[in-house]
Each structure stands twice: as structure tokens, then as C-alpha cells.
Image (spheres, rainbow, N blue to C red):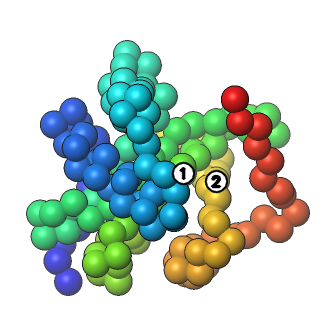
Amino acid sequence: MSATEIIQLTPDRFSDFIDLVFALAEYEKLDAPNAAAVERLYKDAFSKNPRYEAFLAFNGGKPAGYAIIFETYSSFLAKPTLYLEDLFVLEECRGLGVGGVLFNHVKQIGAQRGCGRMDWQVLDWNKIAIDFYKHKNATWLKEWHTYRITF
């Protein structure tokens, strides 16, 4: 097993990040971000007030996965919630511990920032991810339904 290194996204690693985002789109059978979306991803990561943070996982010196996080807020806990937007590991790197290291890294960030919890969503067909999160002692919130309005 190769050592996994986690780094925060930097402008010089943005192309690695976008390659991984495109790989996630392919895995989920979704359209990859278009050129305008890629520009927004760059601007939103590196603006004065970034809209999200991203972390890249490297295994054996090669890009292996990424995570995107941002904070929301819980009025009942009166604490921030760390929201995990994406956690993705390339297929050839699964089973090497990369996902666990990446997940633990963002979980530790939430704890260090005083977040009351970390939330994320999993597609119902993604048994690999569901099993991974069960292994991490995550709780499926059956009583909550996700709704969306698209603008």
C-alpha cells in the first residue's frame, strides 16, 4: 500500500482537480462541467471569499481522489455543519485506503473548526460508497428527503 498524501487545492493543481471532477462525472454517468463551469470552479475556489474548499489525494505521487467541502449552519446546534459535497477516488485507487485518508482528513477539519456535524449525500445506487460510509460508522438519515430547485 502506497502512502496517501492530502493537499489543499492550489492553482497549480487545478488541472488535476478538474480531471478528477470529470472522472466523477463519468462514473456517475453525468455531463462533465462545461468550460464556463470550469471557470466558475476556479474563481469560486480562489476568490477573496472562496465558496468551497477542495482537497486532493495523491497515492504514489499521482492524483487519486478529491473532496469538496463548505460550511452550512445548524440553528438547532448553533454550530456550523461541514458539508461534504464530493468525495471521489479513482477506480484504480480504491481499496488502497485513499478514501479513508481523505474522509478522515475532512472529518478532522470539521472537528477542528468546531462544527457540530458533517453532512453529505450518497446516490441510492452507489453501493460502494454506501458500504464505505457504513464502515465509517455514518448514519443514514431515512427520515430526511432531499429536494431540489434548479435555477
Closest to the observer: 99 or 73? 99
In the image, residue 135 lies at what x, y percent? Answer: 55, 81
- Residue 54 versus residue 57 in the image, above or below: above
Give the secondary structure at mark 2.
strand
Which quadrant: the N terminus?
A: bottom left
Name which residue lies at 49% across and 51% down.
31
On screen, 8 above or below 98?
above
Against 85, residue 28 (above or below) is: below
Identify the residue position indicated by label 2 in the image: 119
Q: Which quadrant of the structure image shows residue 11?
A: top left
Q: In the rendered image, is residue 111 in sight?
A: no
58 vs 46, left or right, is: left
Amino acid under disc 1: Leu
**Residue in the picture at 32% in, 56% down:** 20
Which of the image's four quarters has the C terminus? top right
* Labels 2 and 1: the sequence-earlier one: 1
Instruction: Identify the residue at image location x=78%, y=65%.
Output: 141
Mark number for residue 103? none
Q: Is residue 132 visible?
A: yes
Q: Which residue is mark 1?
A: 84
Q: Residue furthest left?
A: 61
| Vertical order, 71 against 109 (above or below) | above
Give how far across and how far down residue 66 sits, in percent: 36, 55
Residue 134, position in %: x, y? 61, 79
